[in-house]
Image (cartoon, rainbow, N blue to C red):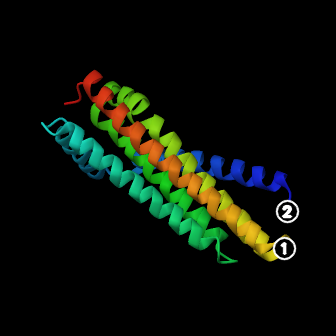
Amino acid sequence: MYAGSVYTTLIFYSLLFACGMLVGVIGYFALPAWMRYDVATNIVVLIHALHSNAVVHSIGKAAFWDAFYGMLFILLFWVLGHIPIATPLIVFFLFLRALSLGLAITGMIYAFGLQGAGFDLLGVLPWNILSGGAVVLSASVATQFTRQQLFSRAPAMRRYLAYCALHSMSISILFLSGWLQVQVMERALSVFSLS
């Protein structure tokens, strides 16, 4: 295996993630009006819960669960990397993660207008760039490990250690994004009065 294929896979999955977010944005407006209203209402309830007296506790809890779900994706990609025919599943789950992010961002803009867009840019997007990057890295590494199992003659133990090290790096990036989420969300909630 050569380095060019690793970069090609990483670029392809990054573009797939961006397209999945775009499909989520477009898909939000393809929903019936009552579903858009229901999603927006749920987002408003969530924001009001964050504005309650336990803002830091709620944000910390949300950051923990976001990092936990991201780790589940990374664990899923780690397991799928051991299966030789799992590349379509990796692509599907990566696209699903991006689609849900696009739906959530658009729902926030639909619920709060320009303030929601500002909140998305300053409070949601920075840590989602990190966590999305960790998931894309994990998916790329899993796909390359699957290919190496089939076609490489390099020592298996060295490949496996590199595979586990890159997944561990993805998990540490998720913890960093959780910390960034707590820091950024507090400030974004104080700047934008979403109601």
Residue 181 image point, x, y percent: 38, 39
Residue 185 image point, x, y percent: 33, 34
Label 1 vs 2, first from the N-terminus: 2
Residue 36 image point, x, y percent: 30, 47
Q: Is residue 33 visible?
A: no
Q: Residue at x 63, y 59 (%)?
A: 165
- Residue 151, numbered circle: 1
Residue 63 against residue 190 in the figure, above or below: below
Q: Residue at x 52, y 68 (%)?
A: 76
Assign the C terminus to one quadrant of the image.
top left
Choose top left, top right, bottom left or bottom right for residue 59: top left
Q: Residue at x 59, y 59 (%)?
A: 167
Instruction: Tell me the kind of residue under disc 1.
Output: Phe
Residue 37 appears left or right of 118: left
Count of numbered marks: 2
Assign the N terminus to one quadrant of the image.
bottom right
Residue 145 against residue 180 in the figure, above or below: below
Q: Look at the numbered discs 1 and 2 and tell me whether their residues touch, using CB distance below 8 Å.
A: yes
**SS category of the residue bearing label 1:** helix
Q: Is residue 188 visible?
A: yes
Residue 85 appears left or right of 112: right
Q: Nearer the viewer, residue 29 or 174?
A: 174
Rounded to the nearest whole Å, what is the CA distance between mark 1 and mark 2?
Answer: 8 Å
- Residue 1, numbered circle: 2
